[in-house]
Image: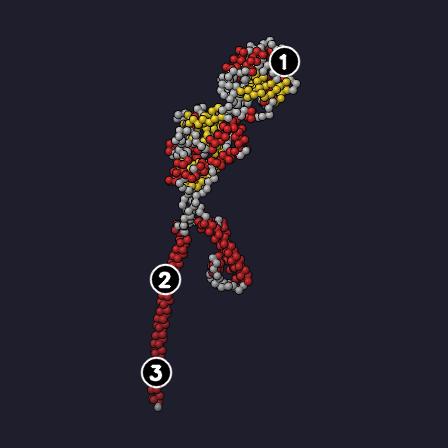
C-alpha cells in the first residue's frame, strides 16, 4: 500500500493476542467504537499502525474491516508499521493536518515496541486511541511514569479491557502521566461525554511546575533577572490562573537576529531556539525568520512602526509660506477673474459712451480692480448703474477672499508646525542626511537588512553597523536629540521612554504595523493553553488593564512658545523693501525723465526762439530796406516835384 497519502489518522489499538477473539471484543463492536472516536475527534484521515508483517489472521481481518468502514464514510485511511511511521513522519507532518492514529498491539512485546517508537516521535502531532486487552489491562489503569513520552498537549484516548469509560492521557510533568475520565462508550448508546469542559478547561493546572523565562534589557542590580514590563505582568497573571511558577533565569541585552557568519541566532531568540528557556517576556515582534525557529502566542499588542526625529525649533516661514493659504489653482483663478473683470468694465464703458476710449483706459480699470482687491477706494465713482454693479460684485468677492486669506494665514502663523524636508520613509531615503537607528539586533534591524524593497535598500546605506546601533530605547532617543539621527521603533516603545527623552521628537508614519507576543520555544506544548487564556484575558479586559498600568497615558510637556524670530517674517520685510526700492527707482526715473523733458523742452523752446529771432531779424532787415527804398522813392518824387515847380 502506498505511503505517499497526504492524510494520516492514528489510532493505537493495543488489543487482544492472537487467537483470543472470543471474550475480548467482537470485531464489529471494535470497528464501531473506532468509527465513533474518529467522528468525535473530527479527524480527516485514519492510519492503522501495527507492529510488523507477522500479524495474526484476526488482527489482519480487523484492519481490513476498519479500512472498509472508513472507506464507506469517505475518510482516507491506510495501514503502517512502526518503522514506516518514523520514516515518513516529516513528510506527513508537512502535508497533513492533525490525524488520528490506530496501532494494533497484541502483546507486551508490541507494547515495548510502541514505547521505543514514542521515544523518538512527537506525540503532540496526531491524536491517539489506545485499546488495552486483558493481558495488558494492568498497564491501562496504572501507567508507570511517562512510558509513552506524552506531552501536555498530547491528545490520547485510552480504552481499557471490558471498561466502558474512555480516559484521556497526557503529561504535566516529564515523568508522570495524568488521567482524566472523559467519555463512556457502549455499542447501544455510543459515545457520551462525561464533561462539557473544553480541552484547555480540562487541562488548566500545571501542578506548580516551574517555567524558565528570558527577558531583554538591563540586568537589575539586585541580581534578579525579573524585569517589570507588560509581558512579565501578563505571564504573572497566567501563572496565577494555570498554577505554575516563573523562573526568570537570564536577561539578554537584545532580542536577537540570525548571525550568518556564526550560523546561529543571538540574544533571547537564540536561547529560545536552543531550548535553554521555555518562555520569553519582552517586546518580541513577529517576523518570518523568527517564526521558523520559535513560536509566538496570540498577539497581545499591536503598534505602528514610526520614525522619530528631533522636532525643529519654531515654524520656519519660507518664501512661499504666504502663498500656501490658497492652492495654485485658486491663485490662477483669482488672477483670471480680475483680468476678466477689468475687460468687462472696459467693455461696459465702451458700450455706454459709444466712442473709443482714451489710450491706457484698460490699465486704469485693471488698477481700479486691483485697488478694490486691497480694499482701496475708487478714484472716481462711475455714474453708470451697470458699471457700479460690476464694481460691487468685485468688491464683495474681494472682501470674502481677504477674510478667508487673513483667517487662514493667522491660523497658519498661530499653530506651530514643525518643518522637515521629508514626511515618510521615501523622503528620508531621498534626503540622505539622516542616519537611521534601530535597536541593536532587533526585528526592526532585521527588517531593513533582509528587505528587497528599493527604498529599504537606500535606507540600509544610511544605517550604522550593528555594533553601533543603540542597546536601549533611551539611548536611541538620546542620539536623536544629539544630531541628525532618525530612530525607527514603535509607538508604544516611545511611550515607555517618553519622560526620559531630553528633547521633543515628532513621528513620521511608515505604514508598517508590528505585532508583539509572548515567545516560546518551537513546538512548545503550552502554546495552545497560553493562547486560550490570553483570548480569555482579552475578552474580560485584563490585557487592557495591564496595558494601561504599564503604558500610561502620555501627556505632552508644557510647551514654551517662543516669539517669532526675524527669519519667520523676513518675507514681509522683503516685500516692503522691494516695494520701497521699486518706488524709489521709479521716482528717480520719473525725476530724471522730468528733468530730461524740461531740458528737451527748453532746448526746443530756445531753438524756436532763435529761429524766430532770425526770421524777425531778416524781416526787420527787409522792412528796413523797404523803408529805405520808400524814403528814397519819396525823396525822388519830391525832387521831381521841385524841379517841376
Label 3 crowd (10 A; few <14 / some 14-19 / many >=20): few
Give residue 639's mark: none
**Residue pictured at 36% horizontal, 64% vertical:** 595
Is residue 50 visible from the viewing direction of this image? no
Disc 3/disc 1 C-alpha distance (Å): 181 Å
85, above or below 611, in the image: above
Taking the spot 35% from the left edge, 90% from the top edge, the residue there is 645
Q: Earlier in the sequence, mark 2 or mark 3?
A: 2
In this orientation, which residue lies closer to the viewer: 261 or 548?
548
| Image coords of residue 587 (percent x, y) | 38, 60
Vertical order, 360 against 171 (above or below): below
Mark number, residue 631:
3
Element assignment for label 1: loop
Looking at the rendered image, the disc whose residue lies closer to the viewer, 2 or 3, is 2
Front residue (pair 179, 521)? 179
* Residue 35 rendering spot, x and y as whole percentages: 61, 19
Q: Which mark is residue 592?
A: 2
As helix, strand or loop, the secondary structure at mark 3 comes to helix
Residue at 40% across, 41% down: 503
Q: Residue at x 37, y 32 (%)?
A: 467
**Which mark, residue 26?**
1
- In which quadrant of the rendered view does residue 264 lie? top left
Q: Secondary structure at mark 2?
A: helix
Q: Residue furthest bottom?
A: 645
Amino acid at each position: 500500500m502506498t505511503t505517499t497519502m497526504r492524510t494520516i489518522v492514528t489510532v493505537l489499538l493495543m488489543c487482544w493476542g492472537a487467537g483470543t477473539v472470543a471474550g475480548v471484543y467482537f470485531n464489529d463492536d471494535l470497528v464501531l467504537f473506532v468509527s465513533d472516536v474518529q467522528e468525535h475527534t473530527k479527524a480527516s484521515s485514519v492510519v492503522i499502525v501495527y507492529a510488523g508483517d507477522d500479524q495474526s489472521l484476526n488482527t489482519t481481518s480487523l484492519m481490513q474491516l476498519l479500512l472498509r468502514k472508513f472507506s464507506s464514510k469517505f475518510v482516507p485511511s491506510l495501514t503502517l508499521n512502526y518503522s514506516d511511521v518514523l520514516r515518513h513522519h516529516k513528510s506527513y507532518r508537512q502535508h497533513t493536518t492533525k490525524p488520528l492514529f490506530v496501532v494494533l498491539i497484541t502483546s507486551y512485546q508490541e507494547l515495548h515496541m510502541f514505547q521505543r517508537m514514542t521515544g523518538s516521535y512527537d506525540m503532540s502531532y496526531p491524536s491517539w486511541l489506545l485499546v488495552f486487552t486483558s493481558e495488558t489491562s494492568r498497564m491501562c489503569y496504572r501507567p508507570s511514569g511517562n512510558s509513552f513520552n506524552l506531552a501536555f498537549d498530547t491528545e490520547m484516548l485510552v480504552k481499557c479491557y471490558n471498561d466502558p469509560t474512555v480516559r484521556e492521557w497526557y503529561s504535566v510533568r516529564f515523568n508522570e502521566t495524568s488521567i482524566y475520565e472523559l467519555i463512556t462508550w457502549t455499542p447501544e448508546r455510543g459515545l457520551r461525554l462525561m464533561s462539557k469542559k473544553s480541552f484547555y478547561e480540562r487541562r488548566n493546572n500545571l501542578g506548580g511546575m516551574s517555567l524558565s523565562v528570558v527577558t531583554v534589557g538591563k540586568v537589575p542590580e539586585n541580581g534578579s533577572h525579573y524585569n517589570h514590563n507588560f509581558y512579565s505582568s501578563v505571564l504573572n497573571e497566567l501563572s496565577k490562573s494555570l498554577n505554575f511558577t516563573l523562573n526568570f533565569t537570564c536577561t539578554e541585552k537584545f532580542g536577537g537576529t540570525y548571525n550568518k557568519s556564526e550560523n546561529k541566532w543571538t540574544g533571547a531568540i537564540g536561547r529560545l531556539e536552543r531550548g535553554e528557556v521555555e518562555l520569553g517576556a519582552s517586546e518580541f515582534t513577529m517576523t518570518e525568520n523568527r517564526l521558523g525557529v520559535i513560536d509566538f502566542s496570540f498577539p497581545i499588542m499591536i503598534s505602528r512602526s514610526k520614525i522619530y526625529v528631533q522636532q525643529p525649533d519654531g515654524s520656519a516661514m519660507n518664501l512661499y509660506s504666504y502663498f500656501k493659504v490658497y492652492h495654485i489653482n485658486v491663485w490662477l483663478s483669482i488672477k483670471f477673474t480680475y483680468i476678466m473683470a477689468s475687460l468687462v468694465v472696459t467693455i461696459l464703458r465702451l458700450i455706454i459712451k459709444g466712442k473709443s476710449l482714451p489710450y491706457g483706459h484698460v490699465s486704469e480699470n485693471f488698477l481700479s480692480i486691483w485697488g478694490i482687491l486691497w480694499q482701496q477706494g475708487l478714484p472716481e465713482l462711475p455714474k453708470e448703474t451697470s458699471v457700479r454693479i460690476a464694481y460691487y460684485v468685485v468688491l464683495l468677492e474681494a472682501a470674502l477672499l481677504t477674510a478667508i486669506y487673513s483667517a487662514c494665514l493667522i491660523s497658519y502663523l498661530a499653530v506651530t508646525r514643525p518643518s522637515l524636508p521629508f514626511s515618510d520613509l521615501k523622503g528620508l531615503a531621498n534626503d540622505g542626511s539622516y542616519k537611521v537607528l534601530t535597536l541593536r539586533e532587533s526585528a526592526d534591524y532585521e527588517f531593513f537588512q533582509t528587505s528587497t524593497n528599493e527604498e529599504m535598500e537606500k535606507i540600509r546605506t544610511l544605517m550604522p553597523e550593528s555594533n553601533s546601533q543603540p542597546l536601549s530605547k533611551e539611548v536611541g532617543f538620546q542620539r536623536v536629540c544629539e544630531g541628525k539621527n532618525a530612530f525607527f521603533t514603535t509607538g508604544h516603545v516611545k511611550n515607555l521612554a517618553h519622560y526620559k527623552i531630553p528633547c521633543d521628537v515628532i513621528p513620521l508614519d511608515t505604514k508598517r504595523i508590528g505585532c508583539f507576543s509572548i515567545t516560546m520555544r518551537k513546538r512548545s506544548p503550552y502554546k495552545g493553553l497560553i493562547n486560550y487564556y490570553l483570548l480569555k484575558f482579552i475578552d474580560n479586559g485584563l490585557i487592557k488593564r495591564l496595558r494601561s498600568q504599564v503604558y500610561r497615558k502620555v501627556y505632552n510637556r508644557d510647551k514654551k512658545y517662543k516669539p517669532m524670530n526675524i527669519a519667520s517674517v523676513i518675507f514681509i520685510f522683503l516685500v516692503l523693501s522691494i516695494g520701497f526700492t521699486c518706488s524709489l527707482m521709479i521716482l528717480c526715473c520719473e525725476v530724471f525723465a522730468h528733468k530730461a523733458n524740461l531740458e528737451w523742452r527748453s532746448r526746443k523752446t530756445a531753438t524756436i526762439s532763435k529761429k524766430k529771432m532770425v526770421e524777425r531779424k531778416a524781416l526787420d532787415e527787409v522792412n528796413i530796406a523797404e523803408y529805405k527804398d520808400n524814403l528814397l522813392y519819396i525823396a525822388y518824387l519830391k525832387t521831381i516835384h521841385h524841379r517841376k515847380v
